[in-house]
Image (tube, rainbow, N blue to C red):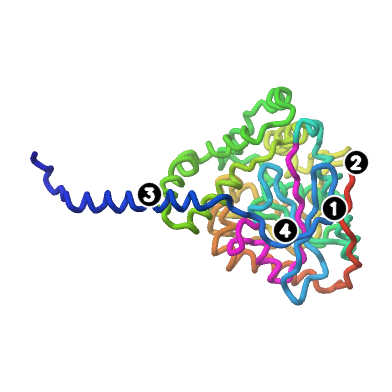
Amino acid sequence: MTLPLGFNLMKTLDEMVIANRKLMDGLNTMLSISDVEVALTPKELVYGEDKVTLWHYLPKAEKISAVPTLIVYALVNRQYMMDLQQDKSVISRWLELGLDVYIIDWGYPDKMDKYLTLEDYIDGYIDHAVDVIRERSGQDKINLLGVCQGGTFSVIYSALYPEKVRNLVTMVTPVDFSIEDGLLFIWSKHMNVDNLVDAFGVVPGSFMNTGFLMLKPFQLMLDKYMGFLENLDKPEAVREFLRMEKWIFDSPAQAGEAFRKFIKDLFQDNLLIQNKLELGGRTVNLKNITMPLLNVFAEQDHLVPPASSKPLNDAVASTDKDMISFPGGHIGIYVSSRSQKDVAPSVARWLNERSIDRDAAPQPRKGPERRSAKT
């Protein structure tokens, strides 16, 4: 048998042996991992209402800001992305830098929640969480830090309740939905959301997740798995991959009526940036936002392009307003090493500088409360 010109049989055999050995090591690694843990930063439950819970993270610094910070995450994913693992936890980093951090866990909506509205989420759950934190801390105003869709909620809340918000931080937050920079914005404009919500009542998380994967099909459905195979024999790399996969496919369902209004009034009619959005009979006027604003966006964000986030600074009436541009993507802003070194400290520094002139001794902390009443 004549071998092709340039073919090195011994080199090929060596590569096959190495590949087989890596595969066997990888299989042993996979078999040794029963599960991967996420959200390991210690926290305490302080309030609950329906399926929503409010958590307070235990402090890590000697000097803690007297003005607490509430993180409002998106409904479409789970909030533990910000605490995925200890060396890639933006929440842990903020605690080390002296922030007093709370976070809302939206839970998992089911068929009972099909009639939940945006008013229930913003005028109800968020406002109740804010009031609990205000009472616990003894502060009239708290810091609000919104992430993605949770950032949009935080902008709306700050415009409706400016008397309760000391400082507003938005991270990868859409506010101008007229753009056509990303597929998510293009697809949403043509979605028949009425048919979707009328058919499902509560929109399945699997439906939402499939849509997000289709935004970058090669990278999210093929390329990452090829990279995974390359690192299959490295236990910690496998654990990191599995943690991310756990988060990606842990997609809550969406309460139908809230989802309907969010798509129609924001993605399709772009009412927020025009000061035409109505919530609970009130008009959301972004000029009511006069508190300090920090707007953080990611330059390579395929979900929320910078063009959707940057107009917020011109839309509000704040005189103290800043932007941080992160050279990465929608998820890298939380889990990358650069985030730990640059973004997290910048946000903490900005908040700490604006939370020092009204320090008050915290009120005695109570046990967790639970309600079951919607607005």
Q: Secondary structure at mark 1?
A: strand
Q: Amino acid at mark 3?
A: Leu
Q: Secondary structure at mark 2?
A: loop
- Point out residue 52 in the picture as x, y percentages from the top left corner: 80, 46
Mark 2 or mark 3, earlier in chain: 3
Residue stretch in magenta: 83-109
Q: Residues within 10 Å of mark 3 (few under 14, many from 20)?
A: some
Residue name at image x 73 percent, y 37 percent: 262
**Total numbered circles:** 4
Q: Which residue is mark 3?
A: 23
Q: Which residue is mark 2?
A: 373
Queried whether the magenta region covers residue 135, the answer comes back as no
Q: Is residue 318 visible?
A: no
Q: Amino acid at mark 4?
A: Val
Question: In whole angstroms, how far apart are the C-alphas of marks 4 and 2?
Answer: 28 Å
Q: Amino acid at mark 1?
A: Tyr
Residue name at image x 88 percent, y 48 percent: 370
Q: Residues within 10 Å of mark 2 (few under 14, many from 20)?
A: few
Residue name at image x 75 percent, y 70 percent: 352
Q: Which residue is mark 4?
A: 169
Quarter of the image containing the N terminus?
A: top left
Q: Residues within 10 Å of mark 4 (few under 14, many from 20)?
A: many
Mark 4 or mark 1, earlier in chain: 1
Q: Which residue is mark 1?
A: 47
Question: In whole angstroms, how far apart are the C-alphas of marks 2 and 3?
Answer: 54 Å
